[in-house]
Image (tube, rainbow, N blue to C red):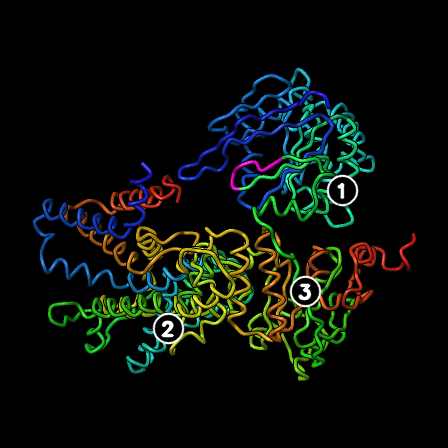
Amino acid sequence: MTHPVLTMEGISKEFPGVKALSNVGFELYPGEVHALMGENGAGKSTLMKVLSGVYSPTQGKIRLKDQEVTFRNPLDAQRQGVSIIHQEFNLFSNLSAAENIFIDRPEMKDRFGRIRWSKMYEEAQRLVDSIGGGEIDVRKEVRHLGVHSQQVIEIAKALSFQADVLIMDEPSAALPENEVKKMFDVVNRLRAQGVAIVYVSHRMKEIFEIADKVTVLRDGAKIDTRMIGEVTEQSLIQMMVGKAVGQLYPVREQQQDQEVVLQVKELSLDSTHRVSFELRRGEILGLFGVPGSGTHTIAERLFGLKRGTGAISIHGAAVKINSPSEAKAKKIAYVPPDRHRQGIIKPMSIRQNLSIPILPQLSKGLVLDEARIKQMSGEYMEKLRIKAPSDGQSVDFLSGGNQQKVVIGKWLAAHPDILILEEPTRGVDVGAKAEIYSIIDQLAQEGLSILLISSEMPEVIGLSDRILVLYKGEIVHEFAHGEADQEQLLQRASHPLIEGGTL
Amino acid sequence: MSAWTISLRVNKLLVQLILLFVILVLFSFLSPYFLSVSNFMNVLNQMVEVGLIAIPMTMIIISGAMDLSVGSILAFSAVCMGVAFEHGMNIWVSMIIGLLAGLLCGAVNGYLIARHRMQAIVVTIGMLVMLRGLVYVINQGRPVSGFPDAFYFMGQQYIGGIPVNAIFLVIMFLIASFVMKKTRFSTYVYGIGNNEKVVRYSGISVVRIRFLLFMLSGLFSALAGVFLVSRLASAEATSGTNIELDVITATLIGGTHIFGGRGSLSGTFVGLLIIVFLRNGLNLLGVSVLYQAVILGALLLLAVGNKKFNGV
């Protein structure tokens, strides 16, 4: 291969008390897509921040096109040809696409300081077209554009600085499943144009689809860089975790229990769409659909966060659920998709977070029974293997996986009959994922009925006894145990009307 | 520098106590009248109204909201009580009417804020203006006086040399502190202040807690009204004007975070002592009320600003 466009040598970064990176080397060649992987806390984001000028390294050198460089700040890095696209886009939603691309750029002004609109629109359109975004009108305000288009705008902005290196941080995280393909097209065009791309992602499948090389970090050190053909999913996980992990998904024993715990009839999702289904004792029922298909609304309806019509019966008795407290009283628990905003109270302790749904049971009269609360939190920390020095620790300092276990634990302590899990492993590293999966499996075996809503197909397929596929507010297909594979699942979820997989 | 700020943060209550101590020592030297039992008892006697309202205010601010209508509720309750008494009702019945009036105002606040999710500041400003107007309408701005002596017991008598109302205030603070440390209500209040959504998603009725908080605030404002009438022997339309500013200042100086989630009643109590003794000392020195306002405002900026600069 040719000469590397970017070399990082012996990069170390220390924060008070923590060595986030130690002696990391990294080479990037033009026209390659280089995946960067590692568990949460492995140092990926620190490395990316060093590379994009947010942090300056404690030690080490960065060479860009054979010249040693230092980046004073992200704008400086951008001007020198290294741009980063964050998971959450940094766009002004009330400005046009073109304005976002060329914001605060002297070359777009004339000598009186007036903006040269026609030149700006022309240039912006040319940039957007060059990466296959021809259908985007750059005069439109960004808030009217879809997520994929917004990402294209971000990339165009990076390219407008003549980017040699483009860092993409979890680029598919914000995209609906069916737009990931479009993003790959953009990445392929960039690769053909000779841009070097650093692709940071948790999603294995994408790495194998798009990357040429992969570098794995663990505990702040580089483990290895390999060609993508040399590795397998299993070996990558091993490199990331540092030990062999067993099977990611537990082997589910087909449940035989036929007792229907939850029956939903004509449950309204919006003014026109209704769904009906049943959930049996000890069953894991997967609900899968692209965003907007109604899976999330089902969870909200069942947990009383949204009202509507339809009949819900639990153990054969008709119930009304108009608020989360009523849902809780009916023994329904809900692990929501966004743990930071809906699941944990960050400054509060593990103990307080675990006990909050069941405080009335943990009180003597009005006064909290501290001894029982301690005992309960100790029990669930052990049961869920929550790693922390003590249950008095604030959940803010826990890793994503342990935070998620707290959210699951607080509902298990309430002894529900029905557990709704939505995105139970979002933003959780692979080690903790396997643990959470085995917990879910064990719960089902103990007789808990679980509704699993997830946008991660392998998760839905790996765990569910049955899968219901939703499309625009309707259940369009049901897969029995072991029937579904990713392709079929995605196809049902995005083009339900086409039979047999041929277009 | 970091070690200094950390220890400063840990001992926040200690810092407040030191500030209080400095104020006490300073004024003891500056004014011969300051350091005396009678002056101290006088100060305690006068802080009760602000103190009573500061109890629910601390809880409300911890829950991430605000109640600006407390002064108007105080006056409304006081005048309702006065008018009932004038119409020939028994003084204790009149008092209960006053308390119910406050409770009703709190319920209206709570209903709009909790049930209809209106902004607390907007709702309570509306109530502040509306109730103050109503107070003048009810009694044409005429003060009511001539209550029986038995009623003055609450605001003017001493038990063992300590004002009755101050004893009542301390008992209320002790009960409230217990509630805010040892009951699930406190977990909910702190939880709502930190992340309301999580509390709701934990199957707890946030509406009920918020409603309860504003009811409490209405009730305690009314109680403050009753004690004020008892102390001054007169129910006036101007009672409690701007009292919310003193209450909020005491709460914030006491370390409660304006955006909620953090704070304590013990802090508020010390904050309360700081502002009343500061006021009293300045009064004794003959400093004009206008300068007192300047000094108090500066103190608040210092107390809150100090936190900002330490990145809290």
Q: Which residues, given as a range, are shown in magenta?
A: A219-224
Q: CA distance from mark 1 to mark 3?
A: 27 Å
The answer to which image quadrant residue A274 occupies is bottom right
The N terminus of chain B: image quadrant:
top left
Which residue does the image show at 35% across and 44% down from the upper left? B307
> Residue flagged by tag 3: what amino acid is it?
Val
Of B244 and A125, the residue lying toward us: A125
Q: CA distance from mark 1 to mark 2?
A: 54 Å
User: What residue would you read off at disc 2?
Assistant: A369
User: What residue would you read off at disc 1?
Assistant: A209
**Is residue A255 visible in the rendered structure shown here?**
yes
Residue A251: assigned label: 3
Which residue does the image show at 45% across and 71% down from the upper left? A359
Is A121 drawn above or below residue B126 in the view shown? Answer: above
| Residue contact at pointers 3 and 2, CB within 8 angstroms | no
Which residue does the image show at 54% across and 39% down from the upper left? A43
**Residue B101: x %, y % from top left:** 40, 73
